[in-house]
Image: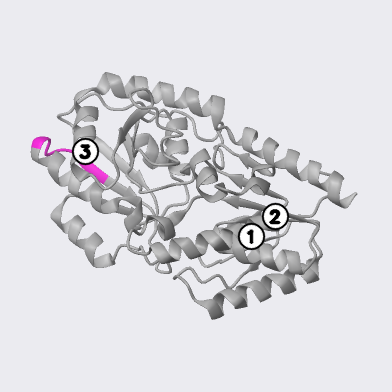
């Protein structure tokens, strides 16, 4: 990027992220993003708000992340004559994992195509999302980069403590995610019940926030029930996940679909063995038998089997953790991601703005 570039950010707000951005000295503009589902009036309001914002700021580049900003931000930026429009698809989310709403996934897929048609470049976080949304779109293929997720700071996330080697003390399985159904939380809980029948001292911990605006959110009542049953400990949301990762023996993510999950990258960087579902996003990080174990999505019994294998093979866990750290350093360090994004910025500024 050119020296002296000004950066302005915007987002839904309400989750504390905006304060972190502002502490970096970067202005944050709160946007009326409705995360509850399809609401044409709310989505039009978002698009008009983005249009006015872009007209006011006159940016040279806009870069959108997540579904609604990508779709409606691209349309607004085109109308506002922003020179360079860039989008990042961070994952396909519950719209594409909800098996009973095919009509919605078809509609959103069409909206994505409209956004891509006015984009100067599109970043994906795995090849399968690129193939799924880019199928039969020859124009898109010429302006796409597949990134290794959002990357991870390997100097911040470093090995602190190896897995425990004693099944008598109990093995701790940690899941780090938003408390949403499509992250596989129900399967995690059911697998925990099955594992605890064999190894009663096993501990399951869930670290992450509930997002009431997401239709896939797990209810407080269910969380309280699981905790009273003793099958799961919900830790809520924290500023720094590293102490919790360091105390975990295995990190689990039984999600139905991902972009490239940061929780797995951070765990791998701290030399933690992984269990994840064999779905887009997760399989980019978890190499079966080397950095962790892959199980089928929506399969609590398969997940339980993988958890028991981890419990019974502490030396395997240690080796998987080391392999995971090496893989992240080589392929997923955030400096790789930042360099690729900045190269695209620079190229497009030279060809479209200079």
User: Which of the two labelled residues, at mark 3 and mark 2, occupies the earlier sequence position?
Assistant: 2
Which of discs 3 and 2 lies nearer the camera? The answer is 2
Give coordinates of residue 251: x percent, y percent.
34, 37
Query: Residue 203: within the magenta?
Result: yes
Q: For the point 23% across and 34% down, which residue is it?
A: 307
Q: Is residue 128 left or right of residue 77?
A: left
| Circle 1 residues within 10 Å: few <14, some 14–19, many ≥20 | many
The residue closer to the viewer here, 175 or 163, is 175
Q: Is residue 274 left or right of residue 29?
A: left
Question: Which mark, residue 302?
Answer: 3
Q: CA distance from mark 3 to mark 2?
A: 41 Å
User: Which of the two labelled residues, at mark 1 and mark 3, occupies the earlier sequence position?
Assistant: 1
Give coordinates of residue 89: x percent, y percent.
56, 51
Q: Secondary structure at mark 1?
A: helix
Pointer 2 residue: 119
Do labels 2 and 1 touch, CB within 8 Å? yes
Instruction: Report the number of numbered marks.
Output: 3
Q: For the point 56% across and 66% down, which residue is it?
A: 12
The residue closer to the viewer here, 194 or 120, is 120
Q: For the point 41% across and 28% down, which residue is it?
A: 271
Q: Secondary structure at mark 3?
A: helix
Pointer 1 residue: 115
Boundaries of the magenta span:
198-204
Determine if residue 226 is in view: yes
């Amino acid at each position: 990027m050119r020296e002296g570039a000004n950066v302005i950010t915007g987002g839904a707000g309400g989750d504390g992220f905006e304060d972190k951005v502002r502490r970096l000295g970067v202005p944050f503009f709160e946007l009326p993003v409705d995360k509850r589902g399809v609401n044409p009036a709310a989505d039009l309001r978002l698009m008009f708000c983005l249009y006015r914002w872009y007209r006011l700021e006159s940016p040279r580049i806009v870069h959108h992340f997540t579904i609604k900003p990508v779709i409606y931000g691209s349309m607004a930026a085109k109308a506002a004559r922003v020179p360079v429009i860039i989008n990042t698809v961070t994952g396909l989310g519950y719209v594409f994992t909800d098996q009973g709403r095919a009509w919605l996934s078809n509609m959103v897929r069409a909206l994505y195509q409209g956004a891509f048609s006015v984009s100067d470049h599109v970043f994906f976080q795995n090849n399968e999302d690129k193939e799924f949304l880019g199928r039969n779109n020859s124009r898109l293929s010429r302006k796409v980069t597949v990134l290794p997720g959002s990357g991870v700071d390997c100097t911040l996330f470093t090995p602190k403590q190896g897995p425990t080697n004693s099944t008598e003390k109990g093995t701790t399985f940690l899941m780090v995610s938003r408390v949403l159904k499509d992250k596989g939380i129900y399967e995690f809980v059911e697998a925990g019940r099955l594992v605890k029948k064999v190894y009663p001292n096993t501990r399951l911990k869930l670290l992450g926030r509930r997002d009431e605006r997401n239709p896939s959110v797990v209810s407080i009542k269910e969380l309280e029930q699981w905790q009273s049953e003793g099958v799961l400990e919900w830790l809520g949301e924290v500023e720094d996940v590293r102490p919790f990762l360091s105390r975990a023996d295995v990190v689990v993510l039984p999600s139905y679909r991902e972009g490239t999950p940061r929780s797995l990258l951070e765990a791998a960087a701290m030399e933690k063995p992984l269990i994840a579902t064999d779905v887009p996003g997760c399989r980019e990080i978890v190499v079966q038998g080397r950095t962790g174990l892959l199980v089928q999505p929506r399969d609590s019994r398969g997940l339980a089997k993988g958890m028991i294998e981890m419990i019974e093979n502490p030396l395997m866990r240690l080796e998987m953790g080391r392999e995971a750290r090496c893989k992240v350093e080589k392929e997923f360090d955030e400096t790789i991601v930042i360099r690729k994004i900045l190269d695209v910025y620079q190229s497009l500024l030279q060809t479209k703005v200079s």
